Image (spheres, grey):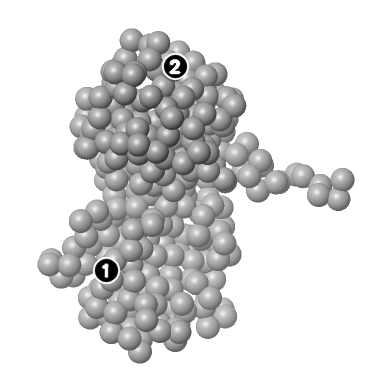
Amino acid sequence: MKIAIYGPEFNERSHSAIVQLSDYLNKKSCAVFVEDNFYDSILKQSTIEIDSYGFETFKTLNSTFDLLISVGGDGTILRAITHVKDLGIPIVGINTGRLGFLATIKRDNIVDALDQIFEGKYRISKRSVLSVNTDREETNFDLDFALNEITVSRKNTTSMISIETWLDDEYLTSYWADGLIISTPTGSTGYSLSCGGPVIMPESDSLVLTPIAPHNLNARPLVISAQREIRLKVSGRENEYLVSLDSRINSLKSTIGITIKKAPYAIRMIELEDGTFIETLRKKLLWGADQRN
């Protein structure tokens, strides 16, 4: 088994998780590769003797890897998928952050979770990915995909922007707002939810368009088929606007339109047998919990 480990720069919250993970994998007959920047930060900023385990490092991944383990929060997984892209490598996250919708393995359950993975006691949840391109070839993005959402928003102004929106070739509306979120089911529990969007089950073949602080108050979040192609044209007082792909921000001129659609590949997330998306919703959103007691 060939395993990749990815994480942000070392911080003390991840200390025990890294030690448990390293000790466990060191006892298994598997090849372990740690992302080189993460490896260097552990070596230089912690007391963990990561070099004593004999792990190798990687800069990029290829299809020979069987698993990627992310150590951090949900944001770390969003950065980890930039290495996975369309390779189909299953991903699982050890949560050393806060919320943990994507990184679901708790620090006190690492060994049990890894036992289940090595014994094959898990499911694969295929998560839709969005791709984006512009109508100007020279402004296409280096990383043109997002797992959570693609957001267009105002840049250097407090004024609202107008976002003309087409579904396939049919005009939908012009959102007069601070921005517009195009979210996958995975991202429906993130930025879109905080702006009033619905929660969508991961297996749903849907997307949601959620306006950010719309001035036309009858504009509401809209769930559409993921087979639709979304075309946007932004205008406003400034001649540039922002496009965010998960947490990666790009600036475009308002003369440039963008097209967003479902990518032809999916991100494969590992779900353990004792954990489901519905259970995560109940725990993270406190559904069914009576705070009066």
**Element on which disc 2 rests:** helix
Residue lying at 34% horizontally and 52% vertically, measured from the top left: 146
The earlier-in-sequence mark between 2 and 1 is 2
Measuring from the top left, give residue 49's x and y in whole percent. Answer: 38, 24
Q: Nearer the viewer, mark 2 or mark 1?
A: 2
* Closest to the observer, 214 or 58: 58
Total numbered labels placed on residues in the image: 2
The residue sitting at the right extreme is 293
Q: Is residue 63 left or right of residue 260?
A: left
Q: Is residue 273 left or right of residue 155?
A: right
> Badge 1, how many Cα within 10 Å: few under 14, some, many 20+?
some
Give me the disc on residue 24: 2
Vertical relation: 102 (above or below) 175: above
Measuring from the top left, give residue 235's x and y in whole percent. Answer: 33, 83
- Type of the residue with mark 1: Ile
- Type of the residue with mark 2: Tyr
In terms of image quadrants, where is residue 50? top left
Q: Is residue 42 left or right of residue 57?
A: right
Residue position marked by numbered label 1 in the rendering: 258
* Closest to the observer, 127 or 144: 144
Measuring from the top left, give residue 57's x and y in whole percent. Answer: 25, 29
The residue sitting at the bottom extreme is 237
Measuring from the top left, give residue 1's x and y in whole percent. Answer: 30, 16
**Residue 268 visible in the displayed image:** no
Residue lying at 33% horizontally and 86% vertically, measured from the top left: 238
Vertical relation: 244 (above or below) 90: below
In terms of image quadrants, where is residue 106? top right
